[in-house]
Image (cartoon, coloured by chain):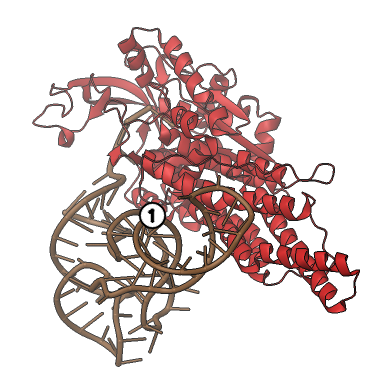
Amino acid sequence: MPTPFYVTTTIPYVNGRPHLGHALELVQADVLARHRRQGGDPVRFLSGTDDNSLKNVLAAQAEGLPTQQLVDRNAAAFESLRKPLAACFDDFIRTSRDSRHRPGVERLWRACAAAGDLYRRHYQGLYCVGCERFFTEAELDAGRCPEHGTRPEPVAEQNWFFRLSRYQDQLYHLVQSGRLRIEPAVRRNEVLGFIAAGLEDFSVSRSQERARGWGIPVPGDPDQVIYVWWDALGNYVTALDYANRGADYRRWWADGSRRVHLLGKGVLRFHAVYWPAMLLSAGEPLPTDILVHDYLTVDGKKISKSAGTAVDPVDLVDRFGTDPVRWWLLCEVPRVSEADFTVERLIARTNRDLADDLGNLVNRVVSMVHRYRAGRPPDPAPGAAAADAERLTTACQLVPDRVAAALDAFDFRTATAAVWTVVAEANRYVDQVRPWQLARAEGDARADGDARAGDDPARSTGDRQASAQLDAALDVLLRSCQTLAEQLQPFLPGTAARIAAQCTPSAGRLPSPRPLFPKVPGW
RNA sequence: GGCGGUGUAGCUCAGAUGGCAGAGCAAGCGGCUCAUAAUCGCUGUGUCGCCGGUUCGAGUCCGGCCACCGCUACCA
């Protein structure tokens, strides 16, 4: 039975250009989307940008640009990741530009207000203008901002607060019971710990002044701007026309069966606590799955634009190709704990896996079909099992389930490794059956047979046997490559298509073998 | 400080319910020649962070210690 599958990435704030970390999340979501789609489920994949963040305003100021202009420029860079990463998102929402967004956020606000969960409260704290944030006494260094060394000024204002405390027990049980699933378990435990420590109401608006006039005004209170997190989290439903509770909203959210959010560990609390509470308040269904990834480091250092350690994914793709970058992100990033990216590792991974193992496998199989069968895929007699092919055929049979199980556990590494069992078994199988020897036996016998016109029944029996064995072996190998094309589709869509093309005869013959991946020269 | 996690072969990491230490990569040796100098096989004397305990038996359970990391309320 098809289950509507809705998957989202977070919407990054666009104060700069996208880096490899953004690519990771996009690619992970993309794999889940493609996998579900391949399984026949209806899929909706959403990405987007958070335009309303104060950081964007500050970045624009720093560049001397109008905020909207900077936001437009940077958001375009994020949206254009689609092609280089082969990310198949169906929709891309921009919180400052999308006409569906603001009315949806307002509706969400009003729904929570109607539930009695929004109230005004006087708030005061020590605010650092440089950081654009409040500090507690404990966080300060001798009363000074640790970042700027300045004394934060006391700011007092009337803000809107959300009654988060009211949902503490409900949230705890939802997470504990798994009805709100959080993967991996470490993150789930963190959330439980956080909730159990006690939830306090949090501020969901700020003054126009502090927001620099950027963002969505509070309905009915134009002096206040909706807290950017409220605004940003709303994107997951506003993009579905929650404003009108339209058809998309009903299909993918209200009546959908899987609502999956991907996010980095840094924003877990907002997604696993605030967001579900907002939805509970508004009387809407919660997400079903919250899948949390860790961060990447580059050359052993945190990704940081200011430190110049941000890697531009588009650059990487230009140099090495879409699928090598995807492959690295998928099979070298563990579920828990950070992964360190280096160009050397990308190259090593590409050469070893994609060129040597996979590319060469397809190449040698297609080449053999050409060399021994003039490019015509053999059509072995039914029931003529290929000798010693059991391990390979078993591997082929098991992959789909293994991939599905791994992806369900949000474990891309195990999923890619599962696919690779076929590659390994196929390469092993070639060496085991030695098609070149079968071809020689066949050729010798045939030559003899031609000369003697079948005088020797024993030789012609050998001929037929070698011939049938070769047919069967090539057939098994070709089918294995086709299995690979199918199973790799969610991970390496471009490569999968090229493998399929290499293994699909036209006018009865396979196309000439062409290497899938050039080997990247090391340095 | 509190809660949680990690520490296993040169590197990256697997190792439900305790039962003779594993995989991949790298390295060395050997084989094959269909293939992108690719591929296949063989080769690991590792204090399983340290110290103690439970057990016939512990990487696996318990206690303590060390190191690193995550979370600890508005850092989009």
Q: According to the colouring, which chain is brown? A: B
Which quadrant is the C terminus of chain A positioned in? Answer: top left
Number of numbered tags placed on the structure image = 1
Residue carrying label 1: A186
Tell me if residue A419 comes above or below residue A31 in the rendering. Answer: below
Residue A334 picture location, percent across and down: 42, 51
Q: Report which colour depicts chain A.
A: red
Residue A401 picture location, percent across and down: 63, 60
Residue A228 picture location, percent across and down: 41, 25
**Observer-nearest residue: A99 or A515?**
A515
Which of the 4 quarters of the picture holds residue A264?
Answer: top left
Please name the residue shown 58% across and 50% down the image: A360
**Observer-nearest residue: A513 or A448?**
A448
Residue A87 picture location, percent across and down: 57, 34
Asked if residue A166 shows in the view, the reply is no
Left-right relation of A198 to A253: left
> Amino acid type of disc 1?
Val
Which of the 4 quarters of the picture holds residue A131?
Answer: top left
Left-right relation of A131 to A162: left
Please name the residue shown 90% across and 75% down the image: A455
Which of the 4 quarters of the picture holds residue A405?
Answer: bottom right
Tell me if residue A19 comes above or below residue A67 in the rendering. Answer: below
Badge 1, how many Cα within 10 Å: few under 14, some, many 20+?
few
